[in-house]
Amino acid sequence: MIDPAKISHRVWAEIDLDNLVFNFKQAQKAAPNSETLAVIKADAYGHGAVPAAKALAAAGAKRFAVATAEEALQLRRHGVREPILLLGMVPTRWAPQLAGQDITLAVGTLEYAETCAELAAGAGVPLKVHVKVDTGMRRIGFEPAEAVASALAVAALPGVEVEGIFTHFCVADDPAEDDFTALQFERFMKVCDGVKAAGLNIPLRHCANSAGIIAHPETHLDMVRPGIMLYGSNPCRHIDFELRAPLSLRGRMAYVKPIGEGESVGYGRTWYAGRPSVIASIGIGYADGLLRNLSNKIEMLARGQRAKQVGRICMDMTMLDVTDVPGVQTGDVATLIGTDGAETITGDEMADAIGTISYEVFCAVGRRVPRLYLQNGEVTGETCYVDLL
C-alpha cells in the first residue's frame, strides 16, 4: 500500500505495473510457441490503457487488441507504435484513418470488407484485416460454411492484406462445456484448413482467450489473446494458475461516528445497528464504480481487519461498520480491493457477492478515481480526472 499520508485523494486505485507484466509473462509461458497479443480494451479493463500498453511493450509485448476505433487511436496519440487489432467491427467511416495509422480491422461480412477497402483506398497503405469466424458465440463473424469462400473473396479485394483469421470461445472457462469448446475449435480448424487448401496463406490463426490459454493448450495456434488474466483474475478457477492482481482500490474515511443500538444507516434504512456501533463513511460511491447492488453484501479492510459495509452505497460515499476495529479514526484508509496487512480482498470476491464477474468490477471503476501507477514499489505516474478537464 502507498503511504496514505502522501495521497490527497478521497479515493484512488493503485495499479502495480510489475504485476501486470508478470501476468503477461505467465501467458507467454503457458503458450511458448505462440505469439502473445495483449487485450487492453475498455481502458485495459479499467486499469489504464496507455500506461498498461507502455509497460507491456517495454516487457516485450508486440501486439495489442482493443474494441473501438477511439481506443486504438488513443494509443497511437500517446506513442504506442505496436500493431493494434480491433476485435469488433467498427463503423466503416473509420477505415481510412485506421489504415493510415496501421490499425488492423476485424471483418465479418464481405459487404463490410468491401466498403472498408473502398473507403481506405486513398490512404496509400494496405488495409490490414483479420477474418472473424463465428463458431458458436453468435455475435459477429462469417458462418463456418461460408467462411472459406468469404476469406478468399476478402483477400482478393484491392488494397487488402489478410493478416489473420480468428474466432472466440464462449465457454472455455467451464469444464462442463469442454465438448462445445472442442466443437468450436473443430469448426475453426476446418475453416483454416480449407483456406490453406485453397491456396491462401493467412499468417495468424488465433482463438485462445485467457481461458483457452489456461485450460485448452491445443487451441493456442499461432497467437493467443490474454485478457482478464493480465488483470489478475483466473477465469478457470478449477485450475491452479499463478496470477498477481495489479489493481488495488482504496478510499479514505471522511467521518467516523458512534451510533446507538437500533439506529438505521443510509438511504432506505436497509441496515440497523444491533448494538452500539461505530460507523465510518468512506469517500467512494457508485459514481466511482462501487456498484450499488453490492450494498450490505461486501467487506472492506480497515487497519488490516475485515469490516462489513452497511447501508445502501450512495453516489459519493459508503458506510463501514468498524465497531470491532480498534483505533479507527477520520482519515484512515479502507481497502475495497487489495491487501492490507495479512488480509486480501480480490475483484473476484467482490464480483461473487452479486453474481457477476471481475471484468465488470474492474471496468466499473470510474473516471474520477485517480490511478496511481507503481513500478518496483514506487509511484511512477498518475492519471487523474482533473487533468482531463
Image (cartoon, rainbow, N blue to C red):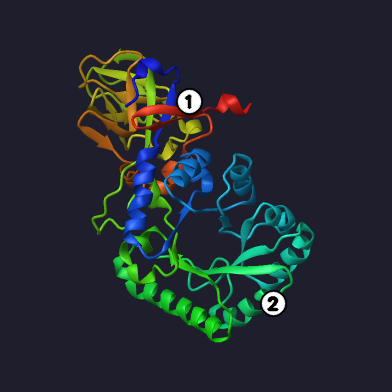
Q: Is residue 313 left or right of residue 148?
A: left
State the residue position of label 2.
Answer: 156
Q: Measured from the top left, where is residue 24 in percent x and y?
A: 38, 50
Q: Which of marks 1 and 2 is nearer the N terminus?
A: 2
- The residue sitting at 40% across, 51% down in the picture is 228
Which quarter of the rendering shows the C terminus? Answer: top right
Neighbor class of circle 1 (other Cα within 10 Å; few <14, some 14-19, many 20+) is: some
Image point (46%, 78%), residue name:
189
**Neighbour tally class for label 2: few under 14, some 14-19, many 20 plus, Cα within 10 Å:** few
Q: Nearer the viewer, mark 1 or mark 2?
A: 2
The answer to whether residue 152 is seen in the rendering is yes
Residue 107 lies left or right of residue 274; in this view the side is right
| Residue for point 27% across, 17% down | 278
Residue 244, label in figure: none
Q: Nearer the viewer, residue 343 or 23?
A: 23
Q: In which quarter of the image is the N terminus?
A: top left
243 versus 206 height, above or below = above
- 23, above or below 326, in the image: below
Instruction: List x then y, in percent, for residue 127.
Output: 68, 63
The answer to whether one can see residue 370 in this image is no
